[in-house]
Image (spheres, rainbow, N blue to C red):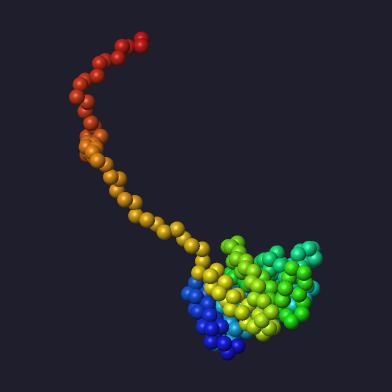
Amino acid sequence: MSDSATRALSRSLLDLCRMRKLKIATAESCTGGLVAAALTEVPGSSDVVDRGFVTYSNEAKHTMIGVEKAKLDTFGAVSKEVAIAMAFGALEHADVDLAVAITGIAGPGGATRGKPVGLVHFAVAARDGRIIHREQRFGAIGRENVRQKSVIEALKMLTEMARGPKTPVKRARAAPHRLHPRASRKPTRTSGKRRQTSRPSKPRASDS
């Protein structure tokens, strides 16, 4: 893949994953392995990219990465549900931290009612349980264009997930502001001595 934008995204993602010690797997249907190809075109990518599953048919989605047949029958291969199942399936079948899944209709044929040419579902799953799903409708822009745009979207989503969850910013606690500050209390004990009361206590009556 010679596209400069794709190459730049691939390099950036690989550098980020190296820094964070993350490994990646891909599960691709309509892109036919192009995401894995974009990443592995960069020299030295083997320290990040573990493997790629090209699951073009429903049977491949089921046998290679464990997508349930009932899910494929109910929602269809090009669906949010199947994309998420593909991502988690790739995660479970590879010793990696992140997995991306792509399933769509690149065209020119294959459209069905409600699922036009150019519809692509993406999912990225992380080992800690996070998941990102996106649906893109690229339109009938040509098979190659749909596939290339899908690669770029997948790389962007992987980068987003690789950056990790947003951690809350810890703000310094401001000192409490009082209009009339309280006088400082005297210590209850002095060093090595027990505090003496100002008045002797009255002797208690004997219980006997």
| Left or right of residue 133: residue 113 | right
Q: How many marks?
A: 0
Asked whether the viewer can see residue 70, the reply is yes
Residue displayed at 41% across by 59% down: 169
| Left or right of residue 121: residue 20 | left
Q: Is residue 197 above or below residue 166?
A: above
Q: Quadrant of the N terminus?
A: bottom right
| Left or right of residue 140: residue 98 | left
Q: Nearer the viewer, residue 190 or 121?
A: 121
Residue displayed at 62% across by 68% down: 134
Q: Nearer the viewer, residue 2 or 61?
A: 2
Dividing the picture into quadrants, the one containing residue 106 is bottom right
Q: Quadrant of the C terminus?
A: top left
Residue 52: x and y in percent read 66, 78
Dividing the picture into quadrants, the one containing residue 81 is bottom right
**Farthest top residue?**
208
Residue displayed at 62% across by 66% down: 133
Residue 42: x and y in percent read 55, 86
Residue displayed at 64% across by 76% down: 138
Dividing the picture into quadrants, the one containing residue 131 is bottom right
Asked whether the viewer can see residue 66, the reply is no
Residue 28: x and y in percent read 68, 76
**Farthest bottom residue?**
2
| Left or right of residue 198: residue 140 | right
Q: Is residue 122 above or below residue 44?
A: above
Residue 53: x and y in percent read 69, 77
Q: Nearer the viewer, residue 132 or 27?
A: 132
